[in-house]
Image: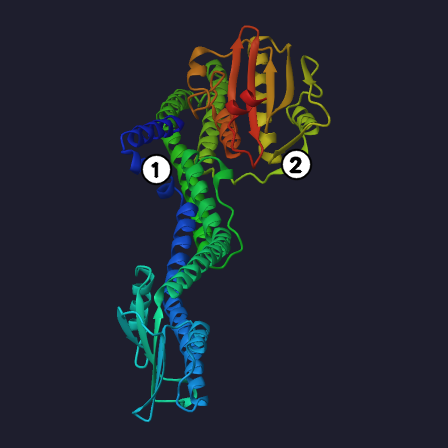
Amino acid sequence: MDKSMANEEARSEAWRAGLPWRQRLGLPMRRSLSRRLLVLTVLFVMLSEVLIFVPSIANFRQTWLEQNIGAAQIAALALEATPDNMVSPALQQELLENAQVLAVQLHRNNSHKLILSEKMPPEVDIHYDLRNAMGPMLIMDAFRTLFAPDGRVIEVTDYPRYGAGDYIDIVIDETPLRHAMIRYGINIFWLSVLISAVTAGLVYLVLLIVLVRPMRRITENMVAFRRNPEDARRVIAPSSREDEIGVAERELGAMQKEIRATLNQRAHLASLGAAVSKINHDLRNILANAQLISDRIGAVNDPTVQHLAPRLFASIDRAIELCTRTLKFGRADEAPPQRTRFALAPLVDEVQEMAGLAEDAHIRWRNEIAPDLMIDADRDHLFRILLNLTRNAVQAIADGRGGEGEIAVSARRAADHVHIDVTDTGPGLAEKAKAHLFEAFSGGTRSGGTGLGLAIAQELARGHGGHIDLVSTGAAGTHFRICIPLEATRLDCKQADAAA
């Protein structure tokens, strides 16, 4: 499965290498939900700021013109203080400069006018009427002003303040207004950038915590489970959320458990299918022996009956044991490991007692594990693993060394893993046993064995995310290694060895 993932990544790299450079630059955005979310948030906030900027710049222009109209109205009213509605040229120029206009006409009673103007007013380039101007028209006029050339002269008509006349006209140079609008636009732009950054950052953080991180956790769990569905650590632990994310986590966890149970059951059923032929063969031999003995059972004192009876009983016992273990294996559905942290050395001592080695003077037992070495594992599962390996070692020594030998158990920590080594001084494994070592009904290490012990031990180790390896075997003995990783680590045993 790891090889297929490597091939898939290689194909993905080759595909990326064949893309144009513009598409390659966009790959990080397409492959990261968080990056895409951040960019889209900034764009949407900037778009909202643009929608705010457009009416605000139009309102700024209108307010600026109305302020100038108000100042021009006050300057025009100064003419009423004179007998002939005339002032000196110097005073007229000062009034125009203070009002920032080139000319002003205040119309009253449809005929009376108060006119304040330079001697040679410039020619008007464009006229604007604010009396009935609507929002869209004000926005269009504002952008015309922004893109107008310097030095343009405009005439603006509006109602005077406080009902002081029918209407008022002013003539002004549009350049100061345009420059003021540009400064205002620049200030609005930087303010928009600041607001966009802050808003986008806050929205991004909230969505990252509430949505993206849980989705990333689900995605990483799905990828990890696909790579190793036998590892119970890959089954997602649902959170307490009650929203759609929580429902997805719970449904994914339930689905992964069902898939894991189905895979285990399928593997067991496949092994059972391979064992059926052996069961039939053994049962035929048993029935043949039973038939042979039943033909002579009438004469209890017959020497032949006395000779065949023990063989009959032994064959029956063997058939019963084989069928029982086979059916038990077919129903097996190992629960996920319930990990706890405990000292390893006392557990190994319990294995020695259960294997009957405490009283056995012929097989020496060496527990070489440091008393302070802790392991994170299911205590019952690890006990069963060690007990199966120990029983195989005892049987190997009994069959090949006449019952004289030694079994040693040691352990060490490698990165985030604990490696447990089980060695014996037996005669080693046969080539046939090594070829199918951890396969049920195929990998028996002794004659007449079913191989279920090693198959179950390997299954329990894989449930922890680890495995069992045959390090060496030969005339000097056999060496098995159990690898148990911490629950939180993502390193496999080979990576842990390299990092140690």
Kindly identify the residue that appears in the image at 35 percent across and 71 percent down: 172
373 sits to left or right of 76: right
172 sits to left or right of 458: left
Q: Amino acid at mark 2?
A: Arg
Would residue 290 be seen by someone viewing this image from the given angle?
A: yes
Helix, strand or loop status at disc 1: helix
Judging depth in this view, the residue of 265 and 26 nearest the camera is 26
Against 307, is 79 above or below?
below
Q: In the current view of this chain or complex, which residue is farthest to the right? A: 371
User: Mark 1 or mark 2, which has the lower sequence index?
Assistant: 1
Kindly identify the residue that appears in the image at 60 percent across and 10 percent down: 425
Q: Which mark is residue 25?
A: 1
Helix, strand or loop status at disc 2: strand
Kindly identify the residue that appears in the image at 49 percent across and 59 percent down: 242
Residue 298: x and y in percent read: 44, 23
* Residue neighbourhood size for the residue with mark 1, other residues' Cα within 10 Å, grouped as few (<14), some (14–19), many (≥20): few
Against 43, is 91 above or below?
below
In which quarter of the view is residue 422 placed?
top right
* Residue neighbourhood size for the residue with mark 2, other residues' Cα within 10 Å, grouped as few (<14), some (14–19), many (≥20): few
Residue 166: x and y in percent read: 34, 89
Judging depth in this view, the residue of 274 and 383 nearest the camera is 383
Disc 2 designates what residue?
341
Judging depth in this view, the residue of 261 and 317 nearest the camera is 261
